[in-house]
Image (cartoon, helix red, strand yellow):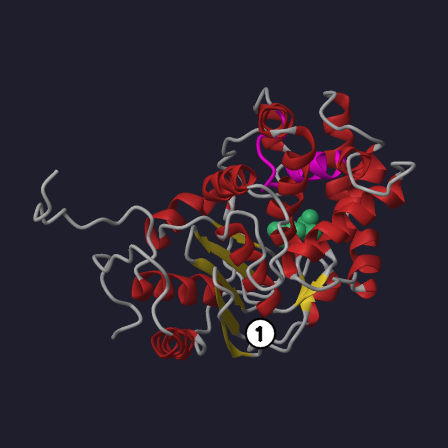
Amino acid sequence: MSPDGPLERVSTGHLPDDATVTTLLQAAYALHRDVRDGHVATYIPQLARADPGWCAASVVSVTGRSFDVGDSDERFSIQSVSKPFVLALVIEALGADRARELLGANATGLPFDSVTAVEVHDHRTMNAMVNAGAIAASSLLQEVARVSPGTSVPDTEAAWASARDGLSAFAGRRLEVDDDVYACESETNLRNRGIAHLLRSYGRIHCEPEVAVDLYTRQCSLAVDVHDLGVMAATLADGGVNPVTGERVVSDGTCARVLAAMATAGLYELSGDWLWEVGLPGKSGVSGAVLTVAPGKGGLAAWSPPLDAAGNSVRGQLVTRSLSRALGLNVFASNPDPHDVPP
Ligand code: GLN
């Protein structure tokens, strides 16, 4: 079976058997691991140290079967792949309608760190997959802490604990901040601080701007490996239940809204191209991760540091596209009904 097969392959139930998934994952990885396009991010100095040759991928089914290939033991900072999970926690705390009102659900068509996007759109934050909306989402983490069991004072540290514990529940293990990435990004994140203050001027941020950016920078600095991201994606694919730990992390309705946000803007201004090629909600981050969800079937994660001009991993996108096609995961693909069953 070719890993770059035609779109017509359509899967209606679960992922195929273990041997088939293993073969397709290895084939997709082998096909793209030597691609040389793209550049490692340098605007966060710690990320510039990444080996451009690193490449790994993971598939985790909604039944908890998991498959890893490549440099799957390497850890990296989660960066923007944290955004859908913080959005999920905010939706759980505030409800989907209020979260949409405060954060937005529409595309900017502009880069993830665009200041212009805040200025030209009356909504300002636009969506929680770009930095403006994500920093606004982090500014609501005290509201998440307020409804978390065991929180007496929903201060900054309680807000951070809610984020870290929430993302850890998605991953099924306790995630820790990479202190070097956090320190280095805190020194260089002037643009994000500018966005936060600008949002504050429009009344679109809900705690002190510097606190919001600090929480956002911490969440971006959490260290993960590709398997963690596979499990996190599978939890979104499984209606909010982590298929490995069995824990319900968020509701099925929350997952559906998060996947809508990912489909709209998960790969920023190239999200339309991504949907065209892959047909699944995805989320990228500047460390080179791409997390993708096949609703009801499983999660895919691919990681390789060299990025395209929008900040999306080149090999990560190619490996995911091959897997989506080979496994028949495109949610827009259908075959004509054979009409052999009476209506
Ligand atoms: N922490 C990074 C930033 O805010 C995340 C961006 C990304 O992964 N696209 O610039």
Q: Which residues are magenta?
A: 124-140
Q: Quadrant of residue 221?
A: bottom right
Q: Is residue 139 magenta?
A: yes
Q: Is residue 263 above or below residue 81?
A: above
**Residue corresponding to mark 1:** 52
Residue at 60 percent of width and 41 percent of height: 130
Residue at 35 percent of width and 73 percent of height: 17
Residue at 14 percent of width and 47 percent of height: 336
Q: Quadrant of the N terminus?
A: bottom left
Residue 173 position, x and y percent, is 70, 64
Is any atom of residue 73 visible in this view? yes
On screen, residue 188 versus residue 340, left or right, reads: right
Q: Is residue 22 above or below residue 10?
A: below
Residue 79 position, x and y percent, is 66, 55
Q: Judging from the image, what secondary structure is the residue with disc 1 in?
A: loop
Is any atom of residue 214 visible in this view? no
Q: Is residue 129 magenta?
A: yes
Q: Quadrant of the C terminus?
A: top left
Say what amino acid the circle numbered 1 marks.
Answer: Pro
